[in-house]
């Protein structure tokens, strides 16, 4: 309590000092402006009269300015974090009393104080007040100011390296200097030869990015902060590898948009996340086409509380739908998403959470009749491969017949566009889950050919950070001391971040050649062994030395390599107008035979036994079951 009272007294004393300083600045500015107006002719006969008139009016002029500063809360601005907005705010606080002085001068003093002197005084006040704050800020960031504040010795055990000597790097250095909890910046690196040997806020730029490991050893670096927002794709991956190899703590800018907008007390930097390890080039969206089918529309997202469904909801909200319907059987995640969207867009955000299952056709009909959605994104599905091997009947009921329920209800209630999220596991499937998703693609094509609704499927691979993703599993195993379990030393997977996948799904929905299967460009497949080693090194261990990797064998239904296209699709696959989306033309499906087989599959799914798998194999000839030793 005593410490709090002391701090309050210090703040009040500081503000009183600033008020006195600003009052002196206003008085001096008017005197100096009048002197400039007189061209320095202080011996002229009119000078004593005008000077005396100024002295007589200065008290109320200073008072008006100070009242404007207090009303505008000038003394609550933390100038060490100030930016352009604060300078504009200061200009406004000066403009108001300048106008008042002009009116009083014109109406009551009859112009003797000169309008030109009034204008010059306003400019001088802005320069002196703004300049005094800026000078203090520069002094605090100068090595001399740091020594006076004792900053150089506050955190000697956490030397920091900044990667990047541009605007973001300078901002990051300033953040660390004003928030000692981040550590003490002692060196920066940059590939620009013009910056080598220079200093930023007193911090020397000592080398290039390739020299990061050597410089970390030389300067005994504890933390590396990567502050180059333009680094993407393979180049970012390489820089992260260099940083991780040093075994230093590695951080990134938490939000590149904060650069230049002040220096936050906390949250300026974040730890590396899974997406950083597999950075890809930024997705460029055709926002006009996406807005054309989302803005002002009612949009339904099934499985909207899931990892990908929730990101779809976030991305949809960017395009200002008339209403967003989050449909999910699991209410907890859907509720959390609703709270997140309300916090971001306000309590009156047009979002409604609807609890229900796609297996319940009556509930779907009720939703469509009540809310009349025009666009549907279908992300609800059972997707865990090993679990669906044990419960194939449940996979069929949810994935196949749940999708059929949704398509039927949507087509009966005037939905214009339905986008089904599919998976690379639907290609030449070896798992029950993959096979059911292939049947979903076939259902999409049958409804596209026999209804007025535009139906498309979007096929992509693994998504970083989604439920069941391998990376969270690796991280948990490393934190427990290992071993890290890997199904096969040669296993490969395609990866994509959740936001990238959601954005490309929206883009594919805008293309909407009904009946088409869109395939997202997943880049090159990633060896899971390499990914595991990267994560192990990131957490400060060495693979095979103090952290073991254990090969446990492929799980039921699991492939060694995933495929994005079937053999018969290869020749027909073509690139769309978006360079990261390919499309396979609709295939011919015998509708009568297909629906007869669906009826047989429904009968088989009444019991969780091998008849379900046998019927799936009959409907999808490329399905190769791998369930020999499983007990149902």
Image (spheres, rainbow, N blue to C red):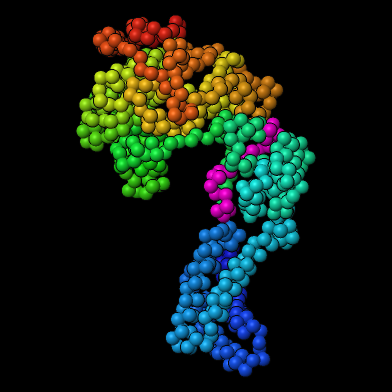
**Up-down relation of residue 175 to residue 578 (above or below):** below
In the image, which residues are magenta? 242-263
Please tell me which residue lies in front, 103 or 429. Answer: 103
Q: Residue at x 60, y 24 (%)?
A: 532
Q: In the rendered image, which quarter is residue 591 located in?
A: top left
Residue 66 horizontal/vertical position (percent): 52, 76
Can residue 85 be seen in this snapshot? yes
Please, which residue is most extreme toward the bottom here?
Answer: 45
**Up-down relation of residue 489 to residue 259 (above or below):** above
Residue 602 horizontal/vertical position (percent): 28, 12
Q: Residue at x 42, y 8 (%)?
A: 622
**Up-down relation of residue 62 to residue 176 (above or below):** below
Residue 118 horizontal/vertical position (percent): 54, 79
Can residue 485 be seen in this snapshot? no
Q: Residue at x 45, y 6 (%)?
A: 629
Residue 598 horizontal/vertical position (percent): 28, 12
Count how many numbered circles sit on residues in the image. Answer: 0
| Horizontal arrangement in the rendering, residue 372 relative to residue 248 (left or right) | left
In magenta segment, residue 205: no
Position of the C terminus by quadrant? top left
In magenta segment, residue 243: yes
| Horizontal arrangement in the rendering, residue 385 relative to residue 297 (left or right) | right
Position of the N terminus by quadrant? bottom right
Q: Residue at x 21, y 26 (%)?
A: 412
Please tell me which residue lies in front, 279 or 354. Answer: 279
Q: In the rendered image, which quarter is residue 542 located in?
A: top right
**Up-down relation of residue 474 to residue 264 (above or below):** above
């Amino acid at each position: 309590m005593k410490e709090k009272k002391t701090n309050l007294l210090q703040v009040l004393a500081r503000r009183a000092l600033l008020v006195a300083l600003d009052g002196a600045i206003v008085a001096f500015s008017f005197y100096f402006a009048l002197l400039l107006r007189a061209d320095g002719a202080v011996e002229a006969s009119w000078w004593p009269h005008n000077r005396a008139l100024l002295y007589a009016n200065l008290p109320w002029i200073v008072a008006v300015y100070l009242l404007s500063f207090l009303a505008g809360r000038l003394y609550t601005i933390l100038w060490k974090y100030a930016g352009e907005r604060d300078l504009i705010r200061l200009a406004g606080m000066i403009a108001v009393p300048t106008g008042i002085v002009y009116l009083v001068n014109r109406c009551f003093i009859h112009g003797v104080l000169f309008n030109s002197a009034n204008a010059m005084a306003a400019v001088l006040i802005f320069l002196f007040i703004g300049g005094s704050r800026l000078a203090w800020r520069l002094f605090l960031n100068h090595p001399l100011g740091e020594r006076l504040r004792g900053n150089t010795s506050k955190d000697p055990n956490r030397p920091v390296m900044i990667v990047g000597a541009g605007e973001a790097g300078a901002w990051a250095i300033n953040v660390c200097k004003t928030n000692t909890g981040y550590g003490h910046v002692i060196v920066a690196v940059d590939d620009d030869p013009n910056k080598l040997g220079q200093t930023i806020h007193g911090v020397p730029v000592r080398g290039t990015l390739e020299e990061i490991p050597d410089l970390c050893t030389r300067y005994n670096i504890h933390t590396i902060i990567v502050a180059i927002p333009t680094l993407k794709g393979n180049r970012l991956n390489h820089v992260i590898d260099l940083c991780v190899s040093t075994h230093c703590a590695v951080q990134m800018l938490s939000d590149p948009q904060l650069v230049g907008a002040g220096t936050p007390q906390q949250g300026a930097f974040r730890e590396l996340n899974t997406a950083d390890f597999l950075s890809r080039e930024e997705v460029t969206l055709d926002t006009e086409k996406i807005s054309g089918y989302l803005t002002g529309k009612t949009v339904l997202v099934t499985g909207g509380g899931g990892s990908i469904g929730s990101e779809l909801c976030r991305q949809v909200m960017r395009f200002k739908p008339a209403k967003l319907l989050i449909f999910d059987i699991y209410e907890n995640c859907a509720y959390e998403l609703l709270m997140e969207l309300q916090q971001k867009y306000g309590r009156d955000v047009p979002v409604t959470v609807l609890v229900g299952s796609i297996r319940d056709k009556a509930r779907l009909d009720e939703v469509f009749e009540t809310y009349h959605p025009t666009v549907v994104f279908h992300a609800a599905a059972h997707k865990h491969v090993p679990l669906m091997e044990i419960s194939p009947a449940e996979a069929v009921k949810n994935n196949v017949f749940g999708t059929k329920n949704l398509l039927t209800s949507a087509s009966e209630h005037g939905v214009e566009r339905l986008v089904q999220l599919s998976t690379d596991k639907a290609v030449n499937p070896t798992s029950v889950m993959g096979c059911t998703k292939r049947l979903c693609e076939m259902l999409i094509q049958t409804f596209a050919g026999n209804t007025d609704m535009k139906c498309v499927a979007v096929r992509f691979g693994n998504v970083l950070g989604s439920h069941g993703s391998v990376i969270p599993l690796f991280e948990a195993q490393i934190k427990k001391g290992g071993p890290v379990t890997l199904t096969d030393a040669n296993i490969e997977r395609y990866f994509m971040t959740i936001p990238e996948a959601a954005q490309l799904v929206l883009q594919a929905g805008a293309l909407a050649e009904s009946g088409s299967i869109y395939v997202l460009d997943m880049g090159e497949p990633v060896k899971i062994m390499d990914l595991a080693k990267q994560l192990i090194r990131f957490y400060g261990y060495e693979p095979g030395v103090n952290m073991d990797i254990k090969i446990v064998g492929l799980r039921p239904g699991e492939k060694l390599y995933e495929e994005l296209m079937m053999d018969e699709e290869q020749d027909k696959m073509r690139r769309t107008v978006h360079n990261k989306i390919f499309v396979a033309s609709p295939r011919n499906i015998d509708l009568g035979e297909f629906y007869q087989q669906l009826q047989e599959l429904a009968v088989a799914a009444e019991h969780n036994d091998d008849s379900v798998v046998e019927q799936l194999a009959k409907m999808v000839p490329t399905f190769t079951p791998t369930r020999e030793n499983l007990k149902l």
